[in-house]
Amino acid sequence: MGSNRAQLEKKVAELTNKTKLNKQVVQSLVEHYQQKCKDKGLDRDTVRDDLMNQFDMLDDFLLDRIFRTFDISANTQHLKLDDYVMGMATFLTGNLEDKMRFCFNVYDLNGDGYITREEMFQFLKNSMVTKSHDADQDDADEGIKELTELALKKLDQDDHDGRVSFKDFQAAVFGDKLLLESLGQCLPDEKARCRYLKMLGDPDMNHQPTTITAKNRVSTTKRTKFPEQQRA
């Protein structure tokens, strides 16, 4: 019993040093992991359900990409403890650089270091799935292709080679922070972030005003500044 407690305290201290998280928050995350952990680690469905319930993130395609971006050390269907806590640290207290790298990795579907036109099309098509069964799919795809070209123009700012490197992505986001999640929601909104940190026992959240508000996220096409599209 004493040995297990000592190992837990050692792991909490190690992960606290690696992240910007408060020690109490790390301990809560570690305990949560241990409670939900299966034999091989934390599985995709458990992580997906947590993100849906705690952060109102409902897009299954993006949730799968977030899980895979968390899973940096094993590339399996289960998260190791370090990957889970480090991923949550980016979610909850990451700076702009951390968030840019995280979102870029979510959007880079094949992990080759570039967001291609085809990958952008897939994300934008996923975010704009029409509810109407009468919609002409060919017309819908043409509209998404046009939006993809606008997004590519916005994000491919450094070398204009028809694909988005991380350097391109950085330049675009530094110019307009709304482009950070231009291909879909990868991070929690401020209200959900603060609420979750408070639930985990972060003492800094006790000093936050009780009337923290955050505008509801809108669709990618409204949230992202694509002037050409807005004029259409």
Image (cartoon, rainbow, N blue to C red):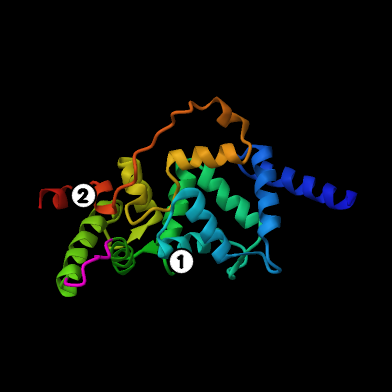
Neighbor class of circle 1 (other Cα within 10 Å; few <14, some 14-19, many 20+) is few
Badge 1 amino acid: Gly
Q: Which residue is mark 1?
A: 111
Question: Which callout, 1 or 2, points at the residue further toward the start of the chain?
Answer: 1
Q: Position of residue 134 (x, y in %)?
A: 16, 72
Q: What kind of element bears circle 2?
A: loop
Work out whether 223 lies above or below 34.
above
* Residue drawn at x 45%, y 38% as measured from the top left: 191
Q: Position of residue 154 (x, y in %)?
A: 25, 52
* Residue drawn at x 38%, y 63% as measured from the top left: 114
Work out whether 201 lies above or below 76.
above
Q: Which residues are magenta?
A: 128-134
Q: In front: 54, or 43? A: 54
Q: Which residue is mark 2?
A: 226
Location of residue 21 (image quadrant): top right
* Residue drawn at x 34%, y 52% as measured from the top left: 168
Give yes or no for residue 228 being in the magenta stretch. no
Residue sitting farthest toward the right: 2
Q: Is residue 211 left or right of residue 143?
A: right
How much space separates mark 1 and mark 2, taking CA atoms? 26 Å
- Give the number of the mark in front: 1 or 2: 2
Q: Is residue 105 left or right of residue 216?
A: right
Q: What kind of element bears circle 1?
A: loop
Q: Position of residue 14 (x, y in %)?
A: 72, 46
* Residue drawn at x 66%, y 64% as measured from the top left: 41
Badge 2 amino acid: Phe
Give yes or no for residue 133 being in the magenta stretch. yes
Q: Position of residue 18 (x, y in %)?
A: 65, 45
Neighbor class of circle 2 (other Cα within 10 Å; few <14, some 14-19, many 20+) is some
Q: In front: 73, or 26? A: 26
User: Magenta span: helix, strand or loop, mainly?
Assistant: loop
Location of residue 76 (image quadrant): bottom right
